[in-house]
Image (cartoon, grey):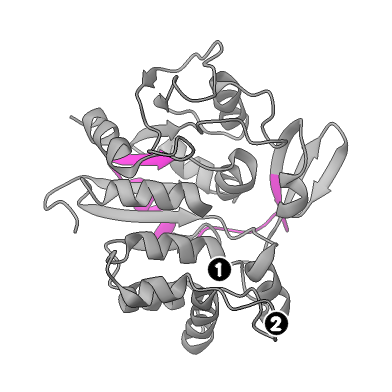
């Protein structure tokens, strides 16, 4: 349930980290939008990209489930994965449903909106771009293409998308322009967060937005993608991709040091009970306090 009269908040990224952020936003935001990367080329999403000529749907599925009623049987079914044998082996049911909705509506945004309506979502999930794109990284080892390959690469300097002319849907740009707060992270720096920002127009929309721009830093380095990174290195990577954040959330009790970070740092205990992922309730408290 959204907070009546609460702020308009946009989460940018993809995967499990952005899903955690969306669960946090439900505690205080009046209007929630997720702008999600569609560059995944692994697992069920990657197979459907090849078989059905659709963008990667898995990260949007995770975000829809995060915004659905926690007691929803349909939301649980969206996360169901079929067994190890047969043509459906390994597919998430939600990916198949979303692919069908996109095909039935003839439009990616309309299809995802239809999925949100089915699930009774407390917000909207939008693709960072409606076009099929491939993530490309410039690293010490040379150019690497494909999200799975980039995630297995260290010492990355920059990521971009192929083809280079992809654009965000107008609804994503409008949400960023109208937001009171934009939350980037937590999540894989290059393969989720910057994969969304790399869509031409997203970084520019972030720069033009009047919103408070918050970066939620990961609890630990992601090996090998951000091996050796401290918080400052994350901030530098964002800046080199055109994103200047207003404040950084960091949990000094986890596994990441601050380094020489030149943006305001808010150090809070954000890890959940298992110490491995952010706790949505703790994250919500800090994010809402930033707007007070």
Give the image quarter of residue 205. top left
Whether residue 171 is in magenta: the answer is yes
Q: Nearer the viewer, mark 2 or mark 1?
A: 2
Q: Is residue 14 visible?
A: no
Residue 23, percent from left and from top: 33, 51
Using the image, tell me which numbered label, if any, was put on residue 172. none
Q: Residue at the far bottom: name it.
A: 104
Crowdedness of circle 1 by 10 Å Cα count: few (<14), some, many (20+)? many
How far from the left and from the top, in percent, is residue 285? 24, 35
Cα–Cα span, label 2 and label 1: 22 Å
> Is 169 part of what is drawn in magenta?
yes
Q: Quadrant of the C terminus?
A: top left
Is residue 132 rendered to the left or right of residue 272?
right
Front in this rendered view, residue 101 or 71: 71
Q: Compared with residue 53, is residue 247 higher up or lower down, i.e. above or below?
A: above
| Residue sitting at x 40%, y 71% | 76
**Sequence-earlier tag: 2 or 1:** 1
Local SS, label 2:
loop
Along the line of sight, the residue nearer the viewer: 283 or 104: 283
- Of the numbered discs in the image, which one, if any, rests on residue 85? 2
How many discs appear? 2
Q: Is residue 285 left or right of residue 75?
A: left
Q: Residue at x 47, y 69 (%)?
A: 79
User: For the magenta stretch, what is the residue range?
Assistant: 160-184
Task: Mark 2: give few (<14), some (14-19) or many (20+) Cα within 10 Å.
Answer: few
Residue lying furthest left: 4
For the point 84% across and 43% down, which residue is it? 143
Disc 1 target residue: 57
Instruction: Give the vertical position of 274 relative to 14 (above or below).
Output: above
Which of these two is toward me, 171 or 76? 76
Q: Quadrant of residue 210?
A: top left
- Cβ atoms at labels 2 and 1 below 8 Å apart: no
């Amino acid at each position: 349930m959204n907070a009546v009269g609460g702020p308009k908040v946009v989460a940018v990224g993809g995967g499990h980290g952005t899903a955690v952020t969306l669960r946090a936003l439900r505690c205080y935001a009046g209007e929630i939008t997720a702008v999600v990367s569609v560059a995944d080329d692994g697992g069920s999403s990657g197979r459907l990209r090849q078989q059905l000529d659709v963008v990667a749907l898995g990260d949007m599925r995770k975000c829809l489930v995060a915004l659905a009623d926690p007691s929803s049987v349909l939301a649980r079914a969206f996360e169901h994965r079929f067994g190890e044998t047969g043509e459906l082996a390994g597919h998430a049911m939600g990916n198949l449903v979303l692919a069908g909705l996109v095909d039935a509506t003839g439009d990616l945004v309309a299809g995802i909106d239809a999925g949100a309506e089915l699930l009774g979502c407390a917000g909207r999930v939008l693709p960072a771009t409606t076009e099929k794109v491939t993530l490309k990284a410039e690293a010490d080892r040379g150019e690497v293409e494909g999200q799975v390959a980039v995630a297995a690469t260290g010492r990355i300097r920059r990521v971009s998308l192929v083809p280079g002319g992809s654009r965000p849907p107008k609804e994503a740009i409008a949400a960023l322009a109208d937001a009171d707060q934009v939350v980037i992270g937590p999540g894989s720096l290059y393969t989720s967060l910057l994969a969304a920002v790399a869509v031409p127009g997203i970084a520019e929309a972030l720069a033009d937005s009047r919103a408070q721009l918050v970066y939620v830093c990961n609890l630990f380095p992601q090996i090998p993608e951000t091996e050796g990174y401290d918080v400052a290195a994350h901030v530098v990577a964002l800046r080199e991709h055109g994103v200047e954040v207003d404040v950084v959330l960091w949990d000094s009790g986890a596994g990441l040091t601050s380094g020489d970070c030149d943006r305001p740092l808010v150090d809070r205990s954000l890890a959940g009970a298992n110490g491995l992922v952010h706790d949505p309730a703790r994250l919500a408290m800090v994010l809402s306090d930033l707007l007070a």
